[in-house]
Image: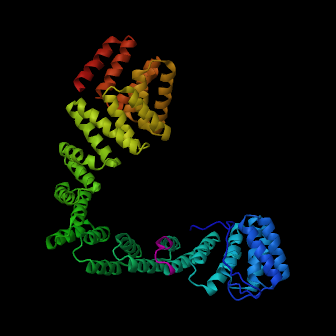
Amino acid sequence: MLRKSLFLPVFFILGIGFPGLSFAQSGAEEVNDQALNFYMEGMRLEMVGEYDSAARAYTRAVEADSTSATLFFALARTQLRIGKMQAGEESLEMVIRLDSTNTDALKMLAELAGAQKDSERAIAYLQKILNHDSENQYALSDLAEHYRALGDSLLEAATLERLYEVNPRAIHALGRAEQIYLNAKEFEKALALYNKLLRTMPDNTELIERELRLLVALERIPEADTFIDSVLEKHAGEGEFIALKGKYLGNVKGSEAAINYLEQALINSDSGWEPRFMLGQLYFETKNYESAIPHLRAALDANPAEPTAVSFLALSHLNLEQAEAAYKLLENFIPAFPDNFFLHYLLGSVARDLGTRENDTALLEKALRELSRAIELRPDDNQSLHVYATTADQLGKTRKAMNAYERILKTTPEDDLAMNNYAYMISENVTDVDSLLYAAKLIQKALVITPDNPSYLDTAGWVYFKLGHLRAAREMLEKSLSKDPANAEVLNHMAKLLETMGQVEAAARYRQEAQQSE
């Protein structure tokens, strides 16, 4: 709620005339000539910013006539302006004694009580405003805030509902009331609130979904069925609402029921892209990717601005091992979605896989660019950083790969895969002892998390080998081979280690095994 500060200058047009003047505040007031003169002097001083002097003039005015609420309000205003808070509050109380319906004074008293964190007193003043002005939005909004401060959430929600009745544009008030009712398990009140909102916004699918979810959670399925059917009657043939019923059926009665309904709906009407997209998504979720593709393609043709359809369609192709089709699709659509993280990540991953399979440096470079864009959009996404690091490593861009692992470990220090990969890169590319000791620390920590991973055991053996700890290295490599005996890389590491230890014949046997395993 936006509200002006209590202590900004407030000048009321109070009616200026001769003795016997009527002050138009809440009721007619007549003040004597002496009080009127002091009042006029106070107004003049207040308007030029001489608030101390104005307060003194208003004090003389109330001394000359202590029956005028207008005079006491002017005095309170200047007292608060110069920081005399208690005196200002006392003057406002005098206003209320003289004029119990003075809304301005009651507002200021409520604000002062709120500033002192006395919500109960603030509520009392706000209730006085509402007693004679039941639709005062200021009072209702602040009343809700004070109920919230006291922890009386149900009274807060009831007040917010009343605020919405007074001002139907205050949708935020009902949003807060909804959350209160759900948290308090006041489900009937939440349902009544949804119905109230839907009368104002009958086309709001989010509200319809909320009511459906609540009815399902309450196991009132027949009521939910009736409700969604009534929505469909009002929106016959409209794709958005057909898709909504399909989603509801999928959640409550299973994918088969939802698929059957949507297939029939698509036969009987030309209902737009939403039901086709929902049907494609349901086929995808049931792993029927071949059936998903034509529906997702049709949805995308009808609405090329739907990035989720691109994602599901690309993933369907990938699940059918149609990486080239997924790549072509993503490359065609990515210019339309320059800020979509997932599409950049997906295109980068597909390009990396194709580039690796075909030994295509250009595809790997493309992958690195797309993954770089994904990381720009989500700097702390570990999955993107992992794929970026492995791609950079494949391209021989060692520093970029190592930087990516450093970023992962900075935000997620328990990422054992990053520890392993970074440690191995250090052992392959750095020779100083301090760096190798750091690599040893990383891989030891990774093995605490995942002790039987053969790749991690191999990394530990190779780091120990580079440090010259040959017995420890052999122990780690033997453990790795006991879990993955045909791993050519580990076999070659063992051959190198045994050569260094002078066991040439044993080294040759391991090297031969490595060649046979490649």
Q: Is residue 384 left or right of residue 282?
A: right
| Quarter of the figure that contains the C terminus | top left
Q: Nearer the viewer, residue 224 or 457?
A: 224
> Which image quadrant: the N terminus?
bottom right
Where residue 37 sits in the image (x, y, percent)? 80, 78
Decide if residue 412 is in sight here. no
User: Which quadrant would residue 125 be assigned to in this image?
Assistant: bottom right
As displayed, is residue 99 above or below residue 147?
below
Front-most of residues 445 and 509? 445
Measured as percent of width and height from the top left, residue 246 is found at: 26, 69
**Residue 98, percent from left and from top:** 76, 85
Q: Which stretch did the figure color magenta?
A: 166-173
- Residue 50, percent across and down? 76, 64
In the image, is residue 382 above or below residue 44? Answer: above
Q: Is residue 27 visible?
A: yes
Name the residue located 53 percent from the left edge and 78 percent from the top edge: 163
Please tell me whether residue 371 is drawn above or below residue 261 in the rendered image: above
Q: Residue at x 39, y 25 (%)?
A: 477
Figure label count: 0
Image point (32%, 16%), residue name: 507
The way the protein has been coloured in the rendering is rainbow
The stretch drawn in magenta includes residue 13: no
Q: Which quarter of the figure has residue 127?
A: bottom right
Indicate whether 386 appears above or below 175: above
Left or right: residue 390 versus residue 10 is left
Q: Residue furthest front?
A: 18
